[in-house]
Image (cartoon, helix red, strand yellow):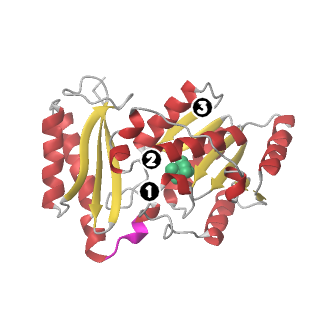
């Protein structure tokens, strides 16, 4: 692992200055927006950015606008020292660690909505969530005028929404989707996994098992969305996961509902294991 000086930027002007210096030196910039509580999945995003651009900046900002009242904003893990050390070890060049007013200056009134996509799937379960995500990502991408921005495909709906937003608003940044990093037993890495204890942690592996079973059925020729969803649902229930918010097969490019998977699809799930809400997905790639 490499380690080096990593600069910390806390306000809008210091980000602009850092960008100016890199532009003048003709260096490309990669950006990894996060909410902190970093794990190997985030570090994988950083390593992709380091491989594809000259300078990498990571932001850590727990965005209140994407949490509904009663969700886990207050208890969302905040580990600034550990995060900073992980980024430094990974070879990250800059940390953007803004306070609230650097993102939402006094008098802030703007809201970004990507509809109807933002009201489907997770948006149905978490009203206002994607408006909060789209708004903060628009602010961040506008501040950090990166050449490429890296997002994990675990949050597949978020990725599709951000790609749409960037296209719709004509933003000059490549949105790069990075495959999900998993624990050895298949559980998708997530900052919220640290809420899982004992039996719930074991039960959570049922999500990956369920999505994998649907993918195996798809690879064996099953194309009916309803049947693929039923296969995954059965495995979830067998694993003791009964609070299934959704399990849905969609078109991978647009997230539109499909009855039959003709082009590339994706199966997405959101469940509650104990008090913890977990999401995951798996691509259903039609054989070439
Ligand atoms: O995926 C996340 O961590 C957040 O939703 C993001 C993109 C950093 C916006 O707050």
Q: Residue 170 at x, y = what percent?
A: 62, 24
Provide the secondary structure element on which disc 3 rests.
strand
Region of the chain picked out in magenta, as a range: 193-197
Q: Residue at x 82, y 34 (%)?
A: 26
Q: How far is disc 2 from disc 1 in space, using C-alphas?
A: 7 Å
Q: Which residue is mark 1?
A: 68
Between disc 2 and disc 3, the foreground one is 2
Residue 150 colored in magenta in the image: no
Which is the main secondary structure of the residues drawn in magenta? helix
Q: Is residue 22 above or below residue 235?
A: above
Q: Which residue is mark 3?
A: 174
Q: Residue 146 at x, y = what percent?
A: 69, 38
Q: Which residue is mark 2?
A: 128
Q: Residue furthest bottom?
A: 198
Q: Residue 160 at x, y = what percent?
A: 45, 35
Tell me the quadrant of the picture where the C terminus can be found: top left
Q: Residue at x 57, y 59 (%)?
A: 62
First in sequence, mark 2 or 1: give its number.
Answer: 1
Quarter of the view holding residue 98: bottom right
């Amino acid at each position: 692992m490499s380690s080096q000086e990593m600069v910390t930027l806390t306000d809008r002007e210091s980000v602009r200055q850092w960008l100016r210096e890199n532009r003048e030196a003709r260096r490309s910039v990669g950006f990894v927006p996060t909410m902190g509580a970093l794990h190997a999945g985030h570090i994988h995003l950083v390593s992709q950015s380091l491989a594809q651009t000259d300078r990498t900046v990571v932001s850590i900002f727990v965005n209140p606008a994407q949490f509904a009242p009663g969700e886990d904003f207050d208890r969302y893990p905040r580990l600034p020292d550990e995060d900073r050390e992980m980024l430094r070890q990974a070879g990250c060049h800059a940390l953007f660690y803004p306070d609230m007013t650097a993102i939402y200056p006094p008098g802030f009134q703007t809201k970004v909505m990507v509809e109807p996509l933002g009201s489907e799937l997770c948006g149905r379960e978490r009203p206002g969530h994607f408006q909060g995500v789209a708004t903060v990502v628009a602010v961040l991408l506008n501040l950090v005028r990166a050449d490429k921005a890296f997002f994990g495909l675990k949050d597949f709906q978020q990725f599709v929404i951000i790609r749409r937003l960037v296209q719709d608003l004509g933003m000059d940044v490549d949105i790069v989707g990075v495959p999900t990093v998993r624990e050895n037993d298949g559980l998708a890495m997530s900052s919220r996994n640290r809420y899982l204890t004992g039996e719930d942690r074991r039960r959570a592996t049922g999500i990956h098992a369920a999505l994998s079973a649907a993918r195996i059925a798809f690879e064996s020729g099953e194309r009916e969305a309803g049947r693929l969803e039923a296969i995954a649902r059965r495995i979830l229930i067998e694993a003791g996961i009964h609070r299934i918010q959704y399990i849905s097969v969609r078109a991978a490019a647009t997230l539109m509902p499909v009855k039959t998977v003709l082009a590339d699809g994706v199966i997405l799930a959101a469940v509650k294991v104990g008090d913890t809400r977990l999401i995951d997905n798996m691509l259903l790639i039609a054989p070439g």
